[in-house]
Amino acid sequence: MNEKELIFSLQKGDPGAFRHVVNTWQHMVYNTVLSIVQDIQEAEDIAQEVFMQIFQSIGSFRGDAKLSTWIYRIAVSRSLDAVRKRKSKKMLANLKSKFGLSDKEESAIHFCHPGVQAENKERSELLFRAMKKLPENQRIAFVLIKLEGLGYAETAEIMKLTIKSVEALMHRAKENLRKELTSYYYGK
């Protein structure tokens, strides 16, 4: 089944077509979401939400982009919404604690992508921690290109930017990560 036939079947509500989409893109969606939110349970929940949104929104899919690009956009958008929501909750908790309204302290969450081999876990954890400090667009470009292995053209399409803009984001992301990780590798 080619992409046009798949989209047509999805828009008709064919459960087999939807199963095909889930089977084809479940790992890509989960890995993308996990790389952005850096929490396994939250990534599982968001990945399910992504597929629910695909099912609910396929009728409005116009075919301006490839189906995979559209799916990536949904995954990235849902992930960023979750990260923003988490930051908002954390700021509220910090504000409450300053006024003595909260007795619960947040502990730092250590994250290591489950696909990372044991001997690379420490470096991976450092990288993911440093990635959290990147501005949103730099982090998304870095995840899509370096972790998901997408090209600059597809990343530009997903992010709705020019290729030059994505190249600039990647350059700045690498520079920021280099600065952040220099102290670990070379000391201050």
Image: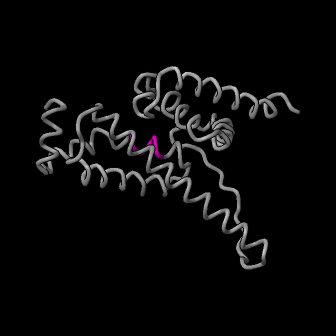
- Residue at 12 percent across and 43 percent down: it is 9
Q: Position of residue 72 (x, y in %)?
A: 38, 39
Magenta segment's dominant SS is helix
Determine whether, in the image, residue 102 is placed left or right of residue 28. right
Q: Locate the C terminus and report the quarter of the image it occupies.
A: top right
Residue extending furthest right?
188
Please say whether residue 30 is one of the residues in the magenta stretch.
Answer: yes
**Quarter occupied by residue 174:** top right
Q: Position of residue 127 (x, y in %)?
A: 65, 37
Q: Is residue 87 above or below residue 129?
A: below
- Residue at 16 percent across and 44 percent down: it is 17
Q: How many badges with numbers are in the image?
A: 0
Determine whether, in the image, residue 177 is placed left or right of residue 170. right
Q: Is residue 159 above or below residue 47?
A: above
- Residue at 34 percent across and 41 percent down: it is 71
Determine whether, in the image, residue 13 is placed left or right of residue 136. left
Please say whether residue 48 is one of the residues in the magenta stretch.
Answer: no
**Quarter occupied by residue 180:** top right
Q: Locate the N terminus and report the quarter of the image it occupies.
A: top left
Q: How is the image coloured?
A: one colour
Q: Position of residue 100 (x, y in %)?
A: 78, 78
Q: Is residue 144 above or below residue 113?
A: above
- Residue at 70 percent across and 65 percent down: it is 106
- The answer to which of 86 and 129 lies nearer the viewer is 86
- The answer to which of 1 and 139 lies nearer the viewer is 139
The residue range painted magenta reads 28-33
Q: Is residue 111 above or below residue 157?
A: below
Q: Position of residue 21 (x, y in %)?
A: 25, 42
